[in-house]
Each structure stands twice: as C-alpha cells, then as structure tokens.
Amino acid sequence: MKQSKQGLHNATGQLEMTGVDLVLKEEAGHLARQLFGNNIKKCVDFTDRLLDIYTRAQGKDFLLIHSPGGWGNTYIKRCLPWERSVVEGVSTTLEQMGYSWLLVQHFRSGSGLCEWVRDMRAQARFFKVKAEILAAELRFLGSHLNNLKVILVGISQGAAFNNAVMQHLGGLETVYSVELGIFFLQKSRRVISERTLVIDGNGVIPDAMMEWNILSMFMAFCGAPFRWVKSRLKGTPIKFSHCVNAPGHEYSWKHPEVRRQIEDFLEFNFSARDKVGVDVS
C-alpha cells in the first residue's frame, strides 16, 4: 500500500509541476464535491486519483480497470493466481492486437470488519452508490480523452460491481465489460448489452456459486476457517476470502473456454493494429 500511495504522490506532484489545466482540476474537484459533499479527504483522494489516471492514460488506446473479487480491496499482486491470469490475458491479447494500454485497479472498499460490513450492504443494493463513483470517473475521462476505450474486468463480486457500473453508464459506447462468475443471487439484477461479455462457467466443471449448489457452497464455507488457520500456522497467511474454494468458481486463463470467449469478444469489438505500445502501472 505504501508503494501505491507513493506512486500516486509522485504522479500528482508531476501534474502540479507541469501545470495541469486549472479548469480541468476545478472540474474534477467539483465532481468530487458532488459525490462526497464536505468530506475533504475523500474529495482530495478522488480528485488526485482522477487526474493521475487522466495524465497516464493520454495517448493510450485502452484503459483496463480491474475490480477485484472478494471484498474488492486486493492488490493485483496478492490476488489469486487464476484471477491475475485473466487480467494478464486481456492485456496480453490487446498487446498482440497492436494496442497500447494502461492498467489500474478500482477498490470499492477498504480493510477491516467495518468496511466488509459496508461492502455486504452495498452488494445487497447492487452497489448502487459505489458504482456511481466509478461511473462518474469514466464519464469524466470519456469527455476529455475522446479516443480512449475502457475495458472493465471483474470476477465474482467484482463482476457484479462492474455490471452495476455499466448500468449507471447507460449508452457510453467507449466502455466495455468482461464479467466472470457473478453470484447466483446477483445474476437476476445484471443487464447484458452488446458491450458486455458474461462468462458463467469455466468450461470444466459447473460453478457452484453460479448454479447455487448449496451443498458444495456449504462445504466450501465450512472448510474456509480451517484453511485460514492452517495458512497462519504454516507462516504463509492468506486472505479469508481466498480460503473459500467453491467447486468451479475458478476462471483461469488456462481454461480453454474462458480464454476463447474473451479473445473472441476482443477480436469482435476491436480491429488489430500494427503498432504495439505497452504501459503497466
């Protein structure tokens, strides 16, 4: 986390040194106040993040936004390997097609019990308020970076969150979404458009979370505390959400059906280019 904050600090510092347009800053600040009212810290964090992404996305073909599964606050390096593989697979495919891209993450919650409770409440409301925050960011970027396309990538709860964002965006045609393994309870609330790819199975075994296989889910949740304690006793602690191993709820890029559907979606929507440029944040 310290490394991420330092990177943001350096980026925003560079913005000030090079003299970012004051009108743009004021517009971002006004948007922040609309979303967060008089909460100064949240307004500053939002404005800094938005201007940071705006600066780094200039000249790029794509902005990739990863919404982590679980509680939505896991850095990409600490995500489960199969979740990382999907994000890496999307970026690699775009690279092979000749596009430049910038990868960022959107965290919908912080750490700690209180944040987890808030996230559960947000899930019950299909992320109505939290989804509007990211949607507002994307509308801002879309109005100032006309040639930038956005691909949202989310798995499990991250998939549901991204679908909620797409619903808030309505007809913003520069934003696409790749959604894998949305929970059964949230499936009825999702909306699928021509810019949305939904994958409800990994092509190997049925997803217990998708199919609402109560017995398999019960066994997975019952075994999670033991796996969590065992990881700590071994000195290799892992997040509790990573200990819930529901059968089929794994969408690795190594699964042929997962890879095929994503590659076909990207190929269908975007034509290849000759020039390759890559930027990893």
Image (spheres, rainbow, N blue to C red):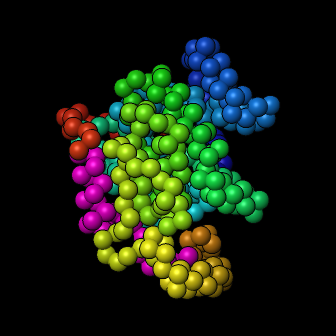
Residue 76: % across, % down: 51, 55
Q: How many marks?
A: 0
Is residue 186 at least partly visible in the picture? yes
Residue at 30% x, 54% y is 262
Residue at 60% x, 35% y is 49
Which quadrant holds residue 135?
top right
Residue nearer the viewer, 255 or 238: 255
Q: Is residue 21 a member of the stretch shown in magenta?
A: no
Residue at 69% x, 33% y is 35
Query: Is 84 left, or right, of 258 in this rendering?
Result: right
Residue positioned most to the front: 188
Tell me the magenta residue range.
244-267
Q: Is residue 248 a member of the stretch shown in magenta?
A: yes
Up-down relation of residue 76 to residue 149 (above or below): below
Residue 186: % across, % down: 53, 60
Residue 229: % across, % down: 66, 82
Query: Is 178 left, or right, of 203 in this rendering?
Result: right
Is residue 78 at least partly visible in the picture? no
Residue 126: % across, % down: 59, 53
Residue at 57% x, 76% y is 243
